[in-house]
Image (tube, helix red, strand yellow):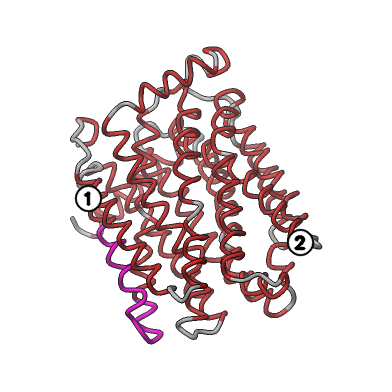
Amino acid sequence: MGIADRLGAVRRLGTELWGGGRGPILVAVAGGWFLSLGVRMIYPAVLPQLRAAYGLDLTAAGLLVTALWVAYALGQLPGGLLDDRFGGGRVLVASTAVSAVALAVVVTAGSVGVLFGATLLFGFATALYGVARFTILSDNYPERGGTAIGLTMAAGDLGSSVLPPLAGALVVAVAWQLGFGFAIPLFALAAVGIGIVVPSARRDAETDASEAGVGEAFRAVAGVMTDRSVLLVTAVQLLGYCVWQGFTGFYPTYLVEVKGLAQTTATALFGGFFGLGILVKPMAGSAYDVYGLRRSLPLVLLVITASMALVPVVEGLAAIAAVTALASSVLGYATITLTYLTGAFPDEVRGTGLGVLRTGYMLVGAASPTVVGALADRGYFDESFFLLAGVGAVAALLAIRVPDRTADT
């Protein structure tokens, strides 16, 4: 295929994604996710300042990150139920509005307890965004779900590539509070924009969880969960999420304390890691749309495994940057697994089903930063990355065992 043909294919894809009045919806949902994920990634970037301000050791710092993600996990099921009951548009507005309030409490926290409490509130508020964005995009892009979801997840990586370095510069130059505070008005603007653009009602669902009853909805979800393919992909998602959490939770701190990099350099590399996700996630989504899960997911997981194993081995800025780029593969696996799992549930319980799954794997994965922090406090910071590599290898083996499906070919 020549360059002209490729450009033509890109133009046709853009026209398809923008057509039918769906383009503004995609932009609004992606913009909100840009903030939701990007601001959460500020926590690892400013951990050195938070540790200094509140006297936290590495274990306590890991607990703070874990608290953020535990709250995010616990909010998935309520987010899914609310999505099925009220529609995704209203849920996204609530998520972004409450996130702005929670950040205001974070920057005014006068004690460790208030800091943890505000972090829990912020994690729960952003959790409401997690499920609704998938159902909205799946409803509006039935033939291009993987691509639309991949683009939206890439927007989150754009936020994670831009916002943590910006926050790192602000906390070094001014104060750690400004590293969070600049995002408060952005969340408020996102709430207004989503409220205007994103429809509240689901497009295709003939019934919803409120009509069928919560008990019936959970029975339908349980029926889907007995499928072997769904169980295996859920297990892969859980293990991949453990790797993602452990790596992102402490990578900037690791680069500063073990590799001896300046914090601005570490946060720039961290931003670059997420910046590559802007390419990785749409590519993973398109690979899933074209080749299916069996031919795309195992390869991504093998690259993840290799990159985690290389982190403690490499020395020098160039080598560290190269491994950081390779590690960005960890940003692509969930585009495949979550698109697959989203399509596994019937429309009327899709939000509830995703909420159940996401609550489960996120609660387990949220412990990963605490494990890494505890190992680091005991002098095993390097070994924690070898542990993450082992988890990635198990996920790759499970991905190979996912049965073939007609929809996947």
Identify the mark at residue 48; answer none if there is no mark. Answer: none
Q: From the image, tell me which residue sits under label 2.
A: 107
- Give the residue type that dot 1 points to: Leu
- x, y (%) of residue 398? 24, 46
Q: Residue at x 39, y 27 (%)?
A: 345
- Above or below, 66 relative to 233: below
- Give the residue type that dot 2 points to: Val
- x, y (%) of residue 182? 71, 63
Observer-nearest of 198 and 237: 237
Q: Residue at x 36, y 31 (%)?
A: 343
Q: Earlier in the sequence, mark 1 or mark 2?
A: 2
Residue 385's quadrant in the figure?
bottom left
- Above or below, 171 relative to 206: below
Closer to viewer: mark 1 or mark 2: 1
Q: Is residue 306 visible?
A: yes
Q: From the image, tell me which residue sits under label 1.
A: 397
Observer-nearest of 306 and 19: 306
Magenta residues (range): 302-322
Q: Secondary structure at mark 2?
A: helix
Residue 25's quadrant in the figure?
top right
